[in-house]
Image: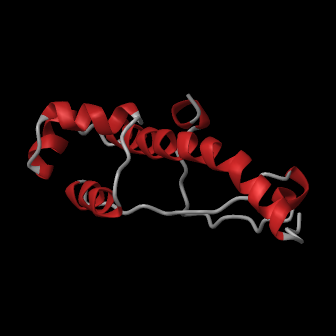
Amino acid sequence: MKLQNGTYATRALNERLPIELGRLPRDIAGTIEWFLQKYEVPQKELAANLGVSEGRVSQILCGDTNLTLRSLAAVAAALDAHFEVRLVPNDPQRKAEEPSRGAGDVEAPDDLINR
């Protein structure tokens, strides 16, 4: 899909932006929750490592919080981990052209990410 003119680009942005603003925090929260479950890290431990309340960790995990990059970096550091980010096309035809991932790459299961 090529965005050929400003009108089309603006319309596409206006249609997709609310969808992405809803999806991204849930995907991130699902990924953090998956990590906590997989590595058996209690929310209480994450809260202590971050220096925040358990309530704040619950807010992060609910996926309704607009997290800053600094907050995400703090979560990763507190878990002695890092985030891997991919930008994936919505168009299934373009998605099929995407290169395969390496054997060491792990993604959170869809059932945790797509709530």
Work out whether 80 lies above or below 92.
below
Q: In which quarter of the image is the N terminus?
A: bottom right
Task: Say if residue 42 shows up in the picture.
Answer: no
Residue that appears at 66% across and 64% down? 101
Q: In this view, does 16 lie to the left or right of 9?
A: left
* Total numbered circles: 0
Work out whether 43 lies above or below 101.
above
Work out whether 79 lies above or below 48.
below
Residue that appears at 55% across and 50% down? 107
- Colour style of the rendered protein structure: secondary structure
Please state which of residues 103 and 93 is positioned toward the viewer in this rendering: 93
Q: Is residue 86 left or right of residue 34?
A: right
Measured from the top left, where is residue 38 in percent x and y? Answer: 38, 39
Measured from the top left, where is residue 24 in percent x and y? Answer: 53, 47
Please state which of residues 74 and 17 is positioned toward the viewer in this rendering: 17
Work out whether 5 lies above or below 43.
below
**Which of the 4 quarters of the picture holds residue 109?**
top right
Q: Is residue 87 left or right of residue 1?
A: left
Measured from the top left, where is residue 77 in percent x and y? Answer: 24, 62
Residue that appears at 70% across and 50% down? 14
Q: In this view, does 34 lie to the left or right of 60?
A: right
Measured from the top left, where is residue 16 in percent x and y? Answer: 70, 48
Task: Say if residue 107 shows up in the picture.
Answer: yes
Q: Quadrant of the C terminus?
A: top right
Please state which of residues 95 and 60 is positioned toward the viewer in this rendering: 60
**Which of the 4 quarters of the picture holds residue 68?**
bottom left
